[in-house]
Image (cartoon, rainbow, N blue to C red):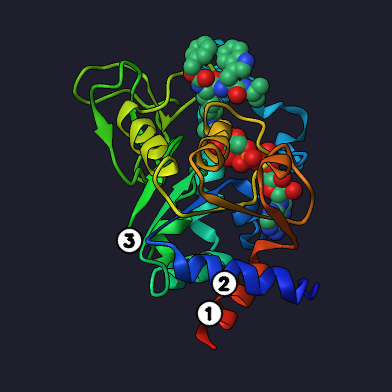
Amino acid sequence: MSELDPELLKRATQWIREADKVVVFTGAGVSAESGIPTFRQAQSGLWAKYDPMRLATVDGFLRDPRLVWQWYAYRRRLVREKEPNPGHAAIFELESWAGELTVITQNVDGLHHRAGSARVIELHGNITRVKCFEGGHVYPDWDDEDAGGGELPPLCEHCGQMLRPDVVWFGEQLPEGALVESFSLAGSCGVMLVVGTSGKVQPAASLPVAAREAGARVIEINPEPSEITPTAHFLLKGASGEVLPQIVRQLRK
Ligand code: BV8
């Protein structure tokens, strides 16, 4: 385990203690230690030859609905087999020390909910929820086994349209309410922890900038520098499943 600079660790815990409102903004890196590949890691196996950026679009789905549906069914199975990791658990535990803590996540795997976090804003939707193509009918907690071996994608039982994952694809607007609430929290929090994101996807990646501009203390947790690093007060260089538990241990002292 990489030991963190004790000075930075102390500063992080002091800032968290002093903050009335803390936001933890997460990306795919926080789920890496759960065994869920990050968005930009090369896909493995069957999916290695596909580019997520092309599959996670309306055009990609319309071009080959069956393929895109199967990609998401594969990812739903993967997510259901995996568990939250010590990083998710530490974020849940931070709720005991921070005034009001909200998780704003770009991830669609639902692991923050499963780790017990009380307030989670899912900016890009949730892969275990599906909806009909026009979006009117939603099927929470979709089970691919129940769908049986029928045509893929399945059709909506209410309107007959193709079903699709209830996630935000590239080129699609983020859920209005989630976005407004997230920028309001960024503009009013005392501390924003930015965990496991490359900072490449907009508008989510503008949240740390909004927080810094509004006077928040911004701390990044990532094994590598990212596009967020210039915006952060400092980077705690390491895996979130190792760094976050060290912060919680320090807070317990
Ligand atoms: C929008 C759901 C308005 C799907 C996702 C041209 C046309 C249209 C739009 C655009 C355009 N140019 C730019 C845009 C905007 C576009 C965008 O940002 N493109 C980028 C890529 C150039 N954004 C959009 O389209 C958004 N909508 O703008 O609407 C609009 C509408 C029409 C026209 C114009 C504008 C919608 C974006 C949402 C896309 N959906 N997910 C699915 O999952 O299938 S985003 C997807 O990427 C995931 O949610 C993922 O979380 C997210 C961001 O990536 P990261 O989380 O940062 O993951 P990444 O792999 O990149 O990085 C992992 C990091 O973890 C690394 O830094 C690594 O070092 C670190 N790490 C690794 N291990 C660990 C770790 N950290 C800690 N611990 C570890 N152990």
Q: Residue at x 77, y 29 (%)?
A: 49
**Amino acid type, mark 3:** Ala
Q: Is label 2's Cβ within 8 Å of ligand 1?
A: no
* Above/below status of 90 relative to 128: below
**Where's residue 116, x and y in %?**
38, 66
Extreme left residue here? 158
Q: Residue at x 45, y 26 (%)?
A: 152
Mark closest to the chain's N terminus, 1 or 3: 3
The CA span between labels 1 and 2 is 6 Å
Say which mark, if any, is on residue 13: 2
The N terminus lies in which quarter of the figure? Answer: bottom right
The CA span between labels 2 and 3 is 21 Å
* Above/below status of 122 relative to 92: above
Extreme bottom residue here? 253
**Amino acid type, mark 1:** Leu
Residue tagged 1: 251
**Where's residue 48, x and y in %?**
76, 35
Asked whether the viewer can see residue 70, the reply is: no
Say which mark, if any, is on residue 178: none
* Above/below status of 144 relative to 253: above
Mark closest to the chain's N terminus, 2 or 3: 2
**Can you tell which quarter of the image residue 234 is in?**
bottom right
Do tag 1 and tag 3 residues touch (Cβ < 8 Å)?
A: no
Q: Secondary structure at mark 1?
A: helix
Residue tagged 3: 118
Asked whether the viewer can see residue 167, the reply is: yes
Q: Quadrant of ligand 1?
A: top right
Mark closest to the chain's N terminus, 1 or 2: 2
The C terminus lies in which quarter of the figure? Answer: bottom right
